[in-house]
Image (cartoon, rainbow, N blue to C red):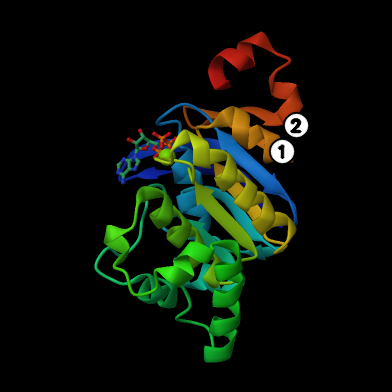
Amino acid sequence: MLKIRDLHTGYGKKPVLFGLSLEVNQGEIVSIIGPNGAGKSTVLKVICGLIPTWEGSLSFNDENINGFTPAENIKRGITFCPQGNRVFDELSVSENLQVGGLHLKKDEFAARQDTVFELFPILKDRLRQNAGTLSGGEQQMLALGRALITKPRLLLLDEPSLGLAPNIIATAFKRICQVNEEMGITILIVEQKVREVLKISHKVYGVKLGKLAFSGLPGELSQSEKLKKIFL
Ligand SMILES: Nc1ncnc2c1ncn2[C@@H]1O[C@H](COP(=O)(O)OP(=O)(O)OP(=O)(O)O)[C@@H](O)[C@H]1O
Ligand SMILES: [Mg+2]
């Protein structure tokens, strides 16, 4: 579904990714792990079109998406859910969801919204509440709900467990599994909660200093002492 070959990019003149290659197949949950500043979020930003590719190729369902804007990518089904609870504080829950569905027809939006409510019933009870007054965990659900409204085929999740209380982290990962299995959405996820994310991943990429230090099955990571030290 998604193929990245020998990707180089960065910010201004500063390089951050040095020839990274990665593949995501339809139906998979693929995780990207690695230390702070390794370039994990940068990988997601370049895929969704927020920052340009310097070198290398980027394709989605065999279409070259190099240089596409986030809007063009959303139309193709690539949706990015950024790090931190990025909701519009001053807008209500309902308005936040509407922002995610701006490109959908009215009845399609209503149907998508219903699936989001099935997954996160709490959002339905809080429709008129300003998003800024939701708790951290509720904001996280809203951010994920808004991303799901876009009807993604590939969902890019950047640290969805960030800021969640330990007792709801397991639930958050369960929801992510549901999104993958029940809604049939392919997921590329960046996570610091490595042990938890490995449990739900079909494949894992370890990034260190802008390069791949590991790619393989989650179980393979724990077989090398060196890799365990870097990533676990
Ligand atoms: N907008 C930006 N302008 C300049 N440098 C940036 C920008 N965003 C990120 N960087 C730099 O790029 C490098 C990689 O950042 P990135 O956010 O991809 O790391 P990360 O692996 O997601 O880290 P973390 O685990 O802390 O979220 C870091 O050195 C960071 O300082
Ligand atoms: Mg990051």
147 vs 7, nearest the viewer: 147
Query: What whole-number distance in Å separates the C-alpha atoms at marks 1 and 2?
Result: 5 Å
Q: Is residue 73 left or right of residue 99?
A: right
Quadrant assignment for ligand 1: top left
Q: Position of residue 11 (x, y in %)?
A: 34, 44
Front residue of 228 and 209:
228
> What residue sits right under mark 2 in the picture?
217
Which SS class for mark 1?
strand
Please state which of residues 200 and 126 is positioned toward the viewer in this rendering: 126
Q: Residue at x 41, y 29 (%)?
A: 36
The secondary structure type at the circle numbered 2 is loop
Residue 209 at what x, y percent from top left? Answer: 47, 27
Residue drawn at x 48%, y 52% is 46
> Extreme top residue here?
225
Q: Quadrant of residue 181?
A: bottom right
Looking at the image, which residue is at 45% across and 81% down?
Answer: 102
Q: Is residue 224 above or below residue 72?
A: above
The residue at which mark 1 appears reads as 203
- Residue 23 vs 126, above or below: the answer is above
Contact (CB < 8 A) between labels 1 and 2? yes
Relative horizontal placement of residue 172, taking residue 136 as reference (left or right): right
The kind of residue on which mark 2 rests is Leu
| 97 vs 12: above or below | below
**Measuring 55% from the left and 66% from the top, which residue is drawn there?**
148
Q: In the image shown, does 110 or 201 lie closer to the viewer?
A: 110
Choose top left, top right, bottom left or bottom right for residue 143. Answer: bottom left
Q: Earlier in the sequence, mark 1 or mark 2?
A: 1
